[in-house]
Amino acid sequence: MKEAGWQEVCEELKEGVLSTDLVLKEVSNVVLKRHRRGELSREEADSALMALKRLLGSALKIEDEAGYVDEALGIAMGTGITIYDAIYIVFSRAKSLTLLTADRGQAKAALEKGLNVRLVD
């Protein structure tokens, strides 16, 4: 999806990225929303999801998010961000990764937790 910052994300994917399996649900949901709004045909939606699947195991490595939920809930409650955004923060901290995000609220919360953040827009 060519949203703000998509070119920077593509550059990161060339290097390879690590995320939780939450990313699969979130990207799939974006595709679904765009299809429902008439921005993507069924064929384009299917093609986008196929592209996501092709990234798995190569440019995109994923891990189960379950082990990060408890700590993420505390961060979400304390900062006002979603549990989804907080999971990425906890995951990034646990793996000593830079958090790549286009979400300013998530970036602020991550910076408050001492993470390295790369804000794309």
Image (cartoon, rainbow, N blue to C red):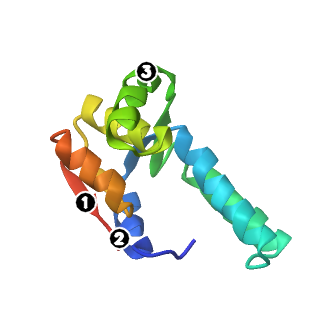
CB under 8 Å between discs 1 and 2: yes
Q: Give me the residue at 42% from left, 67% from top.
A: 10
Point out the image quarter for the C terminus: bottom left
Q: In 3D space, how far apart are the residues under numbered discs 1 and 3 (Cα atoms)? A: 25 Å
Q: Amino acid at mark 3?
A: Asp
Work out which residue is located at the far bottom of the displayed protein and give it: 39
For label 3, the residue is 70
Work out which residue is located at the far left of the displayed protein and give it: 114
Q: Is residue 42 left or right of residue 113?
A: right
For label 2, the residue is 8
For label 1, the residue is 118
Q: Based on the displayed image, in which of its 4 quarters is residue 72 positioned?
A: top left
Q: Based on the displayed image, in which of its 4 quarters is residue 54 positioned?
A: bottom right
Q: Secondary structure at mark 3?
A: helix
Residue 12 visible in this rendered orientation of the protein = yes
Q: Secondary structure at mark 2?
A: helix
From this view, report whether residue 85 is shown above or below residue 30: above
**First-in-chain label (1 vs 3):** 3
Image coordinates for residue 96, horizontal then vertical, percent: 22, 36
Q: Secondary structure at mark 1?
A: strand
Q: Based on the displayed image, in which of its 4 quarters is residue 51 positioned?
A: bottom right
Between 118 and 48, the one lying in front of the other is 118
Q: Amino acid at mark 1?
A: Arg
Q: Is residue 25 left or right of residue 85?
A: right
**First-in-chain label (1 vs 2):** 2
Point out the image quarter for the N terminus: bottom right
